[in-house]
Structures are given as structure tokens and as C-alpha cells.
Amino acid sequence: MTDSLIREIECQLCEDKFSPIIEPEEGEVYYRLYCSLCANWISINITNPVRVTLKEVMGLKGEALALAIQTCLAKCQCGKPFSHDAGGRCSTCLDKIEQESRAIRPSEMFQCPWNLEELRKFEGQILEYLMGKIASKEETLGQLIDRFENGEIDAEVYMEGIESIQFRESRQMSVVQTWAMILGPEIAFRAAEEHDLVERYGSRILVSIAKGLEMSAGKSVLSTLAAEQDNWDGAVGKELRVFMKKIGGGF
């Protein structure tokens, strides 16, 4: 990985100048990151858990964030890395290549889009971040509800609080998904229990772990949770079984 991205590149094919796309354009929620050799591409959504983790935990943004994403991606099926400069080819030429060339046939076997060895370099910082959230004084949903029911806040402040907590915890669950990808199916659930993350977040962290494992190992969320649900009792076990019935049709 280079230390920076060239801001303006001369296309190797048509010689027009272009700038690498490193984030979604205004009003868009994703951008395409192309292979440096063929016309295959990966969609990087603003809600992608790895992207969110690199922003939330590492504090990366802009060019630094783009370079980190590029480094953490697995190679294309053709064997070459994905690159924000698309191998020195502009978007117009890439469109022509996509239309004219025969696309590489996708492998029938599941392939994780992320380089897990690279992601493991952030494991310690991710765990430190999550443990910090447990120790923080951030208001929980239960505390907000209590304040509302006790008449300490009005309905408008209550609804704003719910929105803020949902946004905050959605970012934290994205970090959990990345953490689960790093740990793998044999460790992730037990590690969440050991570090009191289940006590902090409830059953939704189990769903987030399953989503992360789906991205890294290819096993469906429902299959993972079906195999895991008997390991939990009390309120968490009850919530998980209700979730399975609603989403899995009696799984």
C-alpha cells in the first residue's frame, strides 16, 4: 500500500485525466472499487461494517480511510488487488471493458471479500473500543425510558434521545460485526459473553455477531443463530427465540 493516492491520473487507455473515487458521491450511499486488472468491482457502502469500524475505532476518514479499506480487501478472483485508481483506468474505459469483455465467472465456493489477516491487526483496538463502551456513562435506552416515564423529559426530547441511541448503537454493532469476522465462529459468541457484551447489549449483539460471521464464513444468520440459541437462557434466550420465530418462520 502506498502512503497516498494520486489525486489526478492519466488513463492508461484513453489518456484522459481522472481522479480516483474514494468515497460515495453526494447523495449516494456506495461507490465501486475496481480490480486493478479486470473489470470486477466491489461495492463499498457507507454502512459497511468494516468501513464503519475503521472510521469509528481508528478515526480514519477521507484518503486514509480509502487506503485502509483497499488494504483490508481480499484480492479479486483474478488474483489482483482492488484499487481506488482501478489500475489507472478511468470510469468511461471501465464501462467499455465491462460491456465488451467476458466477466470472470464467480466461484461457486464462498469467498470472504475481506483480508482477515489484515483485519486481525485491529483486534486489540476494537476490543478496547468495545470495553470502553461498557465502562462509559452513555445513556442506555432503559435509562432514557425511565426518565421519560418519570416525567423528567417531554416527548420531543424522548424521541430525539431514541434516535440518537439507535444511531450510536448501530455504529457499535457494526464494530461488533467486524470483531466477529476477526474472531470466527468458534470464538465470537463465547468472547462476547466473557467480556460482558451480551449483558450490555442484549440479544441484538448475538444477531450482529451472526451477521459478521455470515460475511466472513458464508453461513446464514438464521443457521448460525439456530445452532446458538440453546446456549442462552433468561431474558437473552427468550429474546433470541422470539427473534428466530419472527424472522425464521419457526426456526
Image: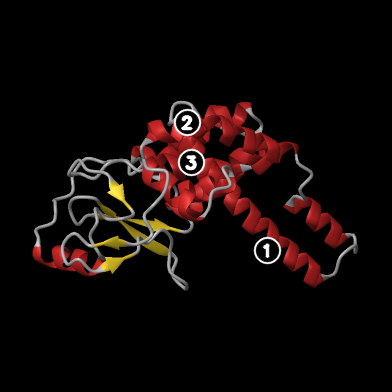
Q: What residue type is labelled 3?
A: Thr
Q: Nearer the viewer, mark 1 or mark 3?
A: 3
- Look at 43% across and 69% down and name the residue there: 25
Number of residues whose C-alpha sits closer than 10 Å to that of mark 1, classed few (under 14), some (14–19) or many (20 or more): few
Q: Nearer the viewer, mark 1 or mark 2?
A: 2
Q: What residue type is labelled 1?
A: Glu
Q: Name the residue under label 2.
A: 121
Question: Gap between marks 3 and 2, in whole Å?
Answer: 12 Å
Q: Mark 1 points at which residue?
A: 163
Q: Is residue 190 above or below residue 38?
A: above
Which comes sooner in the sequence, label 1 or label 3? Answer: 1
Q: Which amino acid does label 2 sit on?
A: Lys
**Residue 220: x %, y % from top left:** 37, 44
- Look at 73% across and 53% down and name the residue there: 141
Where the N terminus falls, by quadrant?
Answer: top left
Q: Which of marks 3 and 2 is in front?
A: 2
Residue 192: image quadrant is top right
Q: Is mark 1 on a helix, strand or loop?
A: helix
Residue 197 seen by the camera: no
Q: Is mark 2 on a helix, strand or loop?
A: helix
Left or right, 121 with reference to 164: left
Q: Name the residue under label 3.
A: 178
Residue 221: image quadrant is top left
Where the C terminus falls, by quadrant?
Answer: top left
